[in-house]
């Protein structure tokens, strides 16, 4: 199953905040064996959000959107998804009760209409209750495609994903994606004509053409990183395909490997 991530928020485009949600979700989805081919960041613009949704659903089985579920005018992810999928928004009572309880706990006696709209979800969606905030997430299935909406704040998104999304996704997909990372010594510790990214890639040769597992090099300030990645029904199955390739790399760089670790 291929999945795609859309992070919504002009603040991300302006660099006002670091997009840690993308990093978190990428790692968690890989653990579940979900292949991610594209990630998109889009600002709080209704037309561009809809265009991103349209493109993503045309090429991926599942699209996860994070951000834009709050009470302000520029929080419009839910509305645009409902519009695109032809679903009306309905109020979820459990989400509304949670919202009222949390807002009253802050000493606010009256709930505004803009705050109330956070409890509205596309009709027919599976609601993901927010135990760490006021805006629920949701899962919508239509014509073989799946759309998942998650709140933007990491303190809400991460527990919601683990509590509600992960169990749902485990039923849809099997397997996991595993990587073994091989860190070469830096140019200060070993000959740069061997441990630099370009010469290291040359020495790896045909290993870089492998498709399962894949082998890739990355330039780092403290030494080149070689990543070997595979997908399997279990972590052990994936590692079983990776280990022979790691051994070949050890033979190519017998004196220049600083560390090896799994991810």
Image: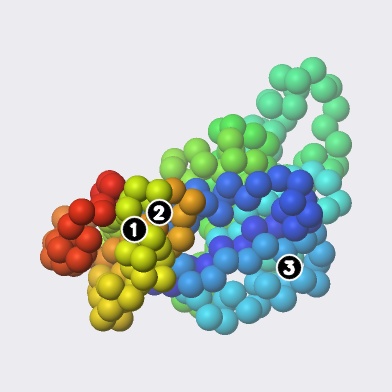
Residue 98 position, x and y percent, is 64, 32
Measured along the vertical axis of the image, is residue 34 above or below residue 121?
Answer: below
Residue at 20 percent across and 66 percent down: it is: 252
Whether residue 172 is visible: no
Relative depth, front residue between 151 and 139: 151
Q: CA distance from mark 3 to mark 1?
A: 49 Å
Residue 67 visible (yes or no): yes
**At which x and y percent is residue 25?**
49, 53
Front-most of residues 155 and 108: 155
Q: Secondary structure at mark 3?
A: helix
Q: Is residue 102 above or below residue 173?
A: above
Q: Tags 3 and 1 in contact by the CB under 8 Å rule? A: no
What residue is pinned by disc 1?
191
Q: Quadrant of residue 113?
A: top right
Residue tagged by mark 2?
187
Secondary structure under badge 2? loop
As rendered, which of 183 and 153 lies closer to the eye? 183
First along the sequence among labels 3 and 1: 3
Which mark is in front, 3 or 1?
Answer: 1
Q: Do the residues under discs 1 and 2 have CB atoms within 8 angstroms? A: yes
Could you tell me which residue is drawn at 66 percent across and 47 percent down? 18
Residue receiving disc 3: 49
Where is the N terminus found, in terms of image quarters? bottom left
């Amino acid at each position: 199953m291929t999945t795609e991530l859309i992070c919504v928020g002009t603040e991300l485009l302006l660099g006002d905040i670091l997009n840690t949600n993308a990093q978190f979700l990428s790692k968690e989805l890989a653990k579940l064996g979900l292949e991610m081919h594209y990630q998109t960041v889009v600002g709080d613009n209704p037309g561009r959000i809809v265009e991103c949704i349209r493109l993503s659903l045309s090429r991926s089985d599942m699209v996860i959107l994070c951000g834009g579920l709050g009470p302000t005018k520029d929080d419009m992810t839910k509305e645009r998804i409902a519009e695109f999928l032809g679903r009306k928004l309905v109020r979820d009572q459990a989400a509304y009760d949670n919202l009222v309880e949390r807002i009253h706990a802050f000493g606010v006696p009256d709930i505004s209409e803009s705050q109330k709209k956070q409890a509205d979800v596309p009709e027919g969606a599976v609601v993901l209750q927010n135990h760490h905030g006021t805006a629920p997430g949701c899962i919508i299935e239509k014509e073989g495609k799946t759309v998942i909406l998650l709140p933007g704040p990491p303190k809400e998104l991460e527990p919601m994903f683990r509590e509600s999304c992960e169990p749902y996704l485990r039923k849809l997909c099997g397997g996991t994606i595993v990587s073994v990372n091989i860190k070469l010594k830096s140019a200060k510790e070993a000959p740069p004509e061997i441990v630099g990214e370009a010469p290291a890639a040359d020495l790896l040769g045909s290993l870089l053409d492998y498709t399962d597992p894949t082998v890739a090099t990355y330039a780092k300030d403290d030494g080149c990183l070689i990543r070997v990645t595979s997908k399997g029904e279990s972590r052990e199955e994936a590692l079983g395909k990776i280990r022979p390739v790691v051994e070949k790399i050890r033979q190519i760089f017998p004196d220049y490997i600083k560390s090896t670790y799994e991810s």
